[in-house]
Amino acid sequence: MSKRQQQEPGAHPDWVSDDDKTLRRNQRHLRRESVRNLADMTKGTRFLGYGPPGPAGGVVWLREKRPSLDETTDQLAGTYPFVAGSGLPYFGQYHGVNRLSGSAWGWDGQVAYAQGIVSNPAMVIYGVIGSGKSMGAKSILWRGMPFGRKWAVPGDIRGEYGRLCRAAGGEPIVLGPGSPMRFSPLATPGRPTGVHEGFWRETIANHRATTLSSLAKAALQRELSPSEKTALDLALRSAVHDDGDSSRWKQPTLGDICTWLLDPPRDVLTRELIPNVPRFVDETYDLALTMRLLVRGVFAGVLDVDTDKTIDTSSPAVVVDLSRLQLDDASLALVVTCTQSAIELGVQFDEAVWTICYDEVWRYMRFYGLVGRLANRIKVVRDLVGGIPLLIAHRPSDWQTGDPRLDSIAEGMLKDIDVHVLHRQSAIEGGAAGRMLSLTSTVVEMLTALDQGSAIWRVVDRKGVSHHLVVDHVIDANGAEWPIMQTDSALVDDYRQIADAGRQMTTLLDKQRQAPVTIGASS
């Protein structure tokens, strides 16, 4: 078989079927075939074991047994010049090959946190276009499913997670022209079993209030004034008729909120002891016009719907496809705020561990409300409230906007995240990444010469020690995973097959010698 034939991706799976039984059978077959492929790829380096019983059980790879190696520190420094700390254990879903040791490499944020390795299970993946970061993220989502993990993508901007969602057994929520699907960020899902009615009402009320506040902050690009906070509270209370009578607790819509803000009832303001009604109306005028944009123009009929249907988190995967909307960054931030809050509410009471994937996160970083909400999610992720964030960006400098407020929040997020996966970067961005993430000059030089699909994993343990690994992401070109994950059919063959770690390390070092990068040099 020629190399060209080996590089051709497999046939695209056809998930469109009128027979639900056949569709579910195809999904089960794909998942089982994926597990078999992973077992074959790790044969010889890992012994195949079995996870816990029941539907959440998954395949695990046990630690390999190798004799210990005793050498002096000088010998180790010469043999492994890239090692900057003790090795990390293998656990969780298989990801690829550790280029330094040639052994299999796997990672699971929840397990790493439970074992006391990291202080936060969140993760961020960087890489220039075509470096393989998207496929790396998809494999993390897909390969975590046999271990009982669920996943969600609040904003699929390019529509590239739909195949993965259908293969997992879910159905993407497609918003935009030509789609009959609609979504209300204020809709109330059914009360979960075992949750008290009073607690559920308080949870929903808090969810709606924080969603409206985040939307307003993202649209206005600033904190809300006391008048604006009061106006949102009164508008929401009026929309749900929240007077203590549960029978009158109806579903509000953004249109209800907008109508109240544009023309606040004077009798309500007087009853609420608003001292200066004309001044109050003037101070909330900008807020009213901003909220109006969410129910008119490009958003008309998309978010302003009277429905109790919200995101269904009973399925193993949730994807909100925004590719039809063709939004600018400001509009995108508003939609993602809505979908993100709805997903967080849905997964809050789910027993399964969720991974929430934020793709193209660089498009959100200029919007105060969304960045603040995302930073808060990362801080409380240890309680598994709202799922474990998986952020995808092009470069570490995406966190810098020039706005001191936003940059301060972004800097805090970088410090809270212990796992940074860095794919190839340009020479200029490599230097910036080194400064922002405190990388050594050796790591920075390697960043500019990484192959497609290869990445440097920087893991900071709870003691503050940084561990660096060069990992080659592995997907079998002839396996079941390739058709549903690939986004670039021109990927090199080494990326899709188990590669020889020693040969790739030699290639990487050769590239460094051919194109050295000088850090901190002046002209």
Image (cartoon, helix red, strand yellow):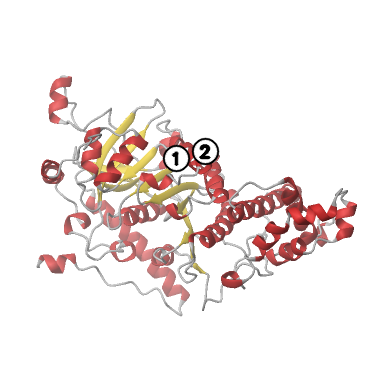
Q: CA distance from mark 1 to mark 2?
A: 7 Å
In which quarter of the view is residue 519 placed? top left
- Residue 354 appears in the picture as rendered: yes
- Residue 382: numbered disc: 2
Pointer 1 residue: 121
Task: Tell me whether the residue at label 1 lies in contact with that at label 2, contact meaning CB atoms closer than 8 angstroms.
Answer: yes
Q: Name the secondary structure under disc 2.
A: helix
- Outermost residue on the front side: it is 523
Query: Which quadrant is home to the N terminus?
Result: bottom left
State left or right for residue 234 relative to residue 477.
Answer: right
Residue lying at 39% horizontally and 63% vertically, measured from the top left: 164
Q: Which SS class for mark 1?
A: loop
Q: Earlier in the sequence, mark 1 or mark 2?
A: 1
**Who is closer to the viewer here, 56 or 178?**
178
Residue kind at label 2, given as amino acid type: Arg
Q: From the viewer's perspective, is residue 385 above or below residue 278?
A: above
Above or below, comparing residue 444 to residue 184 in the picture? above
Residue in front for this viewpoint, 47 or 155: 155
Residue drawn at x 67%, y 68% is 307
Q: Is residue 99 left or right of residue 177?
A: left
Q: Amino acid at mark 1?
A: Pro
Apparent side of residue 357 relative to residue 214 in the rendered image (left or right)? left
Where residue 523 sits in the image (x, y, percent)? 21, 38
Q: Is residue 318 visible?
A: no
Viewer-proximal residue, 351 or 87? 87
Q: Position of residue 452 (x, y in %)?
A: 23, 53
Relative image position of residue 177 (x, y in whole percent):
52, 76
